Image (cartoon, rainbow, N blue to C red):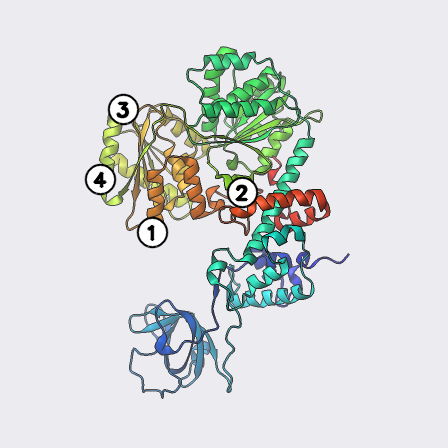
Amino acid sequence: MIRPLEQLSLAILKGVGPRQLKRLERLGLRTLGDLLFHLPLRYQDRSRLTPLADLYPGLETWVEGQILESGIAAGRKRTLKVWLGPVDLQPGQMAFGQGLLLRFFHFSAQQAAAFKPGERLYCYGEVRLGPQSLEMIHPECRFQRGQNPPPLGAHLTPVYPSTEGFSQRQWWALIEQALALLKTQPLAELLPPEVLEPLGLPGLSAALALIHRPPLNTPLAELAEGRHPAIQRLAFEELVAHQTSLRRLRHTARQQSAPALRGDGSLVARLRASLPFQLTAAQERVIAEIAADLGQSRPMRRLLQGDVGSGKTIVAALAAVQTVESGLQAALMAPTELLAEQHQRNLAKWLAPLGIAPVLLAGRHKGRERELRLQAIASGEAQIVVGTHALIQEDVVFRGLGLIIIDEQHRFGVHQRLKLREKGRTQGLHPHQLIMTATPIPRSLAMTLYADLDLSVIDSLPPGRTPVITRAIPDTRRDEVIERVRVACLSGRQAYWVCTLIEESEVLSAQAAEETARALQARLQGVRVGLVHGRLKAQERDSVMGEFAAGRLDLLVATTVIEVGVDVPNASLMIIENPERLGLAQLHQLRGRVGRGAVESYCLLLYHPPLSEIARERLAIIRNLNDGFAIAERDLAIRGAGELLGTRQTGSVQLRIAQPLRDHSLIAPAQRAADLLLERYPGRVQPLIERWLGGREHYGGV
């Protein structure tokens, strides 16, 4: 069987040996299809030749001149300097500081010897203002040999994302070979004409050829902003592939069977009657949606979104009680022991009047204690089980698991969620699933990423929750902020101090947090200071946070590990250092650690001036908005989907080209196209999914 072009190995290309194959694999490139979909970061216009007299800083261009002088300057770092002047000028006629200086910091003796006075040279690079004259640093150089000058660009020149040991010239050579093959073997058109024609989008092979070799008259802004029809064509097909995959997953899930959880309603009614607070209209709406799903004989797959403090846990508790009422068990999995303990305490408090005692299972449970808990789970005596990753270990056996609740779902890998689902699979029945997140996801993104799930949103906060007052303060006023912490702590309140670093290094972050904690302890006599960071063992970290939750610490110095953490109503002040280094969604999550009690709460953003324009805009947004969904929309616009959802994880959805906010107008047509493909062109579905998702389709199977 002849393999299609896009499935051929890159090893067939000239210049790609074992070493280059390894380098390309680092970028996830293994086939010709991968290479063709490896799109340029930006473009250069190499068609222009600018006279030396017309150069200015910031211009990226070709220049032509003759070498007037060259030499190696000694100093802290050896530098090769080459002076370039007009081609009709004799050496020695030009005044010092005129013309263009070429600087090379990395060069061989052979390269230095090649720059001889009188040689005619063509250089491409960015013009900069140096201390003596205009300069180019490490320009691309070509010597004129004979009468013919080197050819200038016949099209816009792409600049590709690269890896160590791979030059742009090598990328151009590889892409040139791939495009030559594409001319004779176009990629299969998997989207039918009735889908593409109404949108006025080009064919796939034509779109790829244009993106890799844009004609000189192609609007650069359209390419850079992703608005060009060629890029929209690729984005649309990727969205169709994702929607098709998610619809197929949803269809598969609907064919499965689940226990219909239809109890008599007595336990649910008793829980409602015993609550010391009134449920909001948003909570009631979501509770009704979940209760209806649980009563069906197909597995519920529902994503529950709610801002920090919106009351998701009581919604989950009511779903768990409906499960118990129907004679089955419910399991709630949280990402940290501390969060699992908090859920267990809340559930125990609410469910005590019903005679239900939720059992906690965590990594710290060992020996006889663990054995007793496992026996309770296996016998069904433990009707509701709360735990961490410990729930998915092999020796954990449920008697009848009817409902799985995953809290902060993006903190778990796909395989972990699948393992828990498998523990509830008995006699052909699958457990219901409720997936919760406090990371507000804009509708445009949710429609793209979670089209296989039903979506419930708690879009209002319980009454009495006062918005946290947010202020941005320059770090030149650090002493005032420390004094404010002292006053708050000595008056019986608690505070957080969050440290951030540019470097994504837990070692450096831990060091910064440790130094900050020492400095604050020295300044704040009488204030009990605790410290948590990512380098601490989970048990040690949870112990410190537990001390803070119990009120035995006044000030908690932390890295962003507290983004998802404990509920401490007495904490009313948060300081976030260098907030300009964090995304809006993360800042909002951190801010949600305070404002959980009745007292007025503050979040102080201690920034380091001067701020960039984008940083000023982001801090203004977090100051002025308390609605997590509105903030998430703005964060998506500024940072993109991958950043908004946090660390990318194996098996999670990753869009390569499409951007849900930018391409929101394509989402509805993509959904219609997905339905059409599944109904009328089923043979094209798998090739389309393989082209865009490879082996990653299972990310939704949770």
Q: Give me the C-alpha separation between circle 2 and circle 1.
A: 31 Å
Give the quarter of the image for residue 521.
top left
What residue type is disc 4 on?
A: Asp
Does 671 sit left or right of 48 as displayed?
Answer: right
Q: Residue at x 31, y 74 (%)?
A: 133
Q: Earlier in the sequence, mark 2 or mark 1?
A: 1
Q: Which residue is tagged 3?
A: 492
Sequence-first tag of 3 and 2: 3
State which tag comes first along the sequence, 4 or 3.
Answer: 4
Label 2: how many Cα within 10 Å (few below 14, some 14–19, many 20+)? some
Residue under the image location 57 percent in, 22 percent down = 291
Q: Which mark is residue 536?
A: none
Can you identify the residue that label 1 sits on? 613
The secondary structure type at the circle numbered 1 is: helix
Kind of residue indicated by mark 2? Gln
Q: Residue at x 62, y 40 (%)?
A: 246
Q: CA distance from mark 4 to mark 3?
A: 20 Å
Q: Nearer the viewer, mark 2 or mark 1?
A: 1
Q: Position of residue 531 (x, y in %)?
A: 35, 34
Q: Which residue is mark 4?
A: 479
Give the spatial CA distance, label 3 vs label 2. Answer: 41 Å
CA separation in Å, label 1 and label 4:
26 Å
